[in-house]
Amino acid sequence: MAATQIGLGLAALGRPDYINVRQNSNIDKSKIAFKNNAFDVMDFAYKNGVRYFDTAPSYGLGEQFLLDWKNTRQHKDIQLSTKWGYTYVANWEIGFDGKHEIKEHSLSKLNEQWKISKQLLPQLKIYQVHSATLDSGILNDGTIHERLFQLKKEHGLQIGITTSGSNQSDIINIAKTIAVNGEGLFDSYQVTYNIFEQSTFETLQELKTLGKTIIIKEALANGRVFANKNVKKHLETLSKIYNTGIDAIAMRYVIDTIDPTIVLSGASTTNHLAQNLKALEFELSTEDLNLLTSLKMDSKAYWNERNDLTWN
Ligand SMILES: NC(=O)c1ccc[n+]([C@@H]2O[C@H](COP(=O)([O-])OP(=O)(O)OC[C@H]3O[C@@H](n4cnc5c(N)ncnc54)[C@H](OP(=O)(O)O)[C@@H]3O)[C@@H](O)[C@H]2O)c1
């Protein structure tokens, strides 16, 4: 079976509370129920051609679940990515009051998290700086760049960054110039792009001409595509025309406008993943793409709204 252009992200699968706009928050939040569900969703994904899985140490037990699943299922043809730089501190406390993840882009954090994440080898293909920002220090820390370069050479990894916020393009434009021993460090960029947040469009086109791996995250704007009253009418009309859900329309928009290496699904149920995968079954017309492009928001307003989402 050919691998799908849709990959599966484990952000919502590995911890009891997340910032997504969840439709059903009335679920069993025990660790075992989460593990069983994560395995069901990953098995369903694999059965339907998904071969790319993305996780991070800060996704609660998300990295452990992916490791356990890899070890028990023994699929040779999967491609995995994880990240370093954030630590999960909510300790599986439902309704944890405070920051759920702490960011630290230091060499010691990299080495500490790599010790665990390297167990995902040899299926681990992309190792990413989790949420690189201008002030986190990662863009100008030569020692960390050298360590990442060493991991890249030693294990044949692609080194990536993930970005968030209204200055994603600024961060990418700096990251793209970072080199070790005269060789560009970053091969892969995990970027937010969707019908509301299109500010990275040109930057992504440029990355493509440079032959970089492009992973799109938050294609459904964390579930906000279902909740936005201003665009509901348009999205519902398109869903009827293409006989699919709003989610598939939004994911297809990403595929038709960017044609990324992978677009991540953040679904936490097999049912939602099945609906997301319908995006692979049709193409949007130029007229409909133009309509969706016109729905874009001001990038700052988009990220302000994102920052206002609560953990649930
Ligand atoms: N690097 C970073 O900083 C970063 C940040 C964010 C995300 N990511 C990566 O990107 C992945 C995807 O991002 P995301 O989790 O924000 O995902 P997203 O795809 O933008 O949104 C996922 C949300 O949409 C809902 N959904 C999906 N299909 C649905 C359907 N058919 N009907 C109703 N609701 C539906 C999901 O609900 P259910 O949970 O109920 O299925 C979930 O709440 C993550 O798992 C992670 O791997 C990385």
Image (spheres, grey):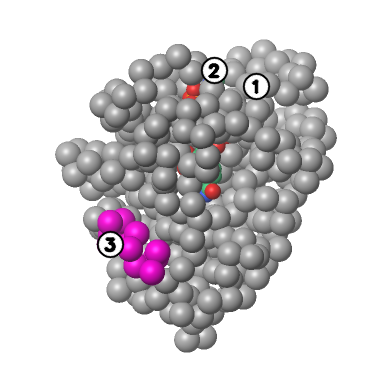
- Camera-near label (1 vs 2) is 2
Q: Residue furthest bottom?
A: 181
Q: Please tell me whether mark 1 sits on a helix, a strand or a loop.
A: helix
Q: Please tell me whether mark 2 sits on a helix, a strand or a loop.
A: loop
Q: Which three-letter amino acid code belongs to the residue tagged 3?
A: Lys
291, 287: nearer the viewer:
291
Q: Main secondary structure of the magenta part?
A: helix
> CB of residue at label 1: within 8 Å of ligand 1?
yes
Local packing at callout 1 (Cα closer than 10 Å; few below 14, some 14-19, many 20+) is: some
Q: Which three-letter amino acid code belongs to the residue tagged 1?
A: Phe
Looking at the picture, how far across and down is residue 19, in whole percent? Answer: 55, 33
- The residue where tag 1 is placed is 226
- The residue where tag 3 is placed is 115
Local packing at callout 3 (Cα closer than 10 Å; few below 14, some 14-19, many 20+) is: few
> CB of residue at label 2: within 8 Å of ligand 1?
yes
- Rendered image: mark on residue 23: 2
Circles 1, 2 touching at the beta carbon (< 8 Å): yes
Looking at the picture, how far across and down is residue 175, in whole percent? Answer: 60, 69
User: Residue sitting at 65 percent across and 28 percent down?
Assistant: 224
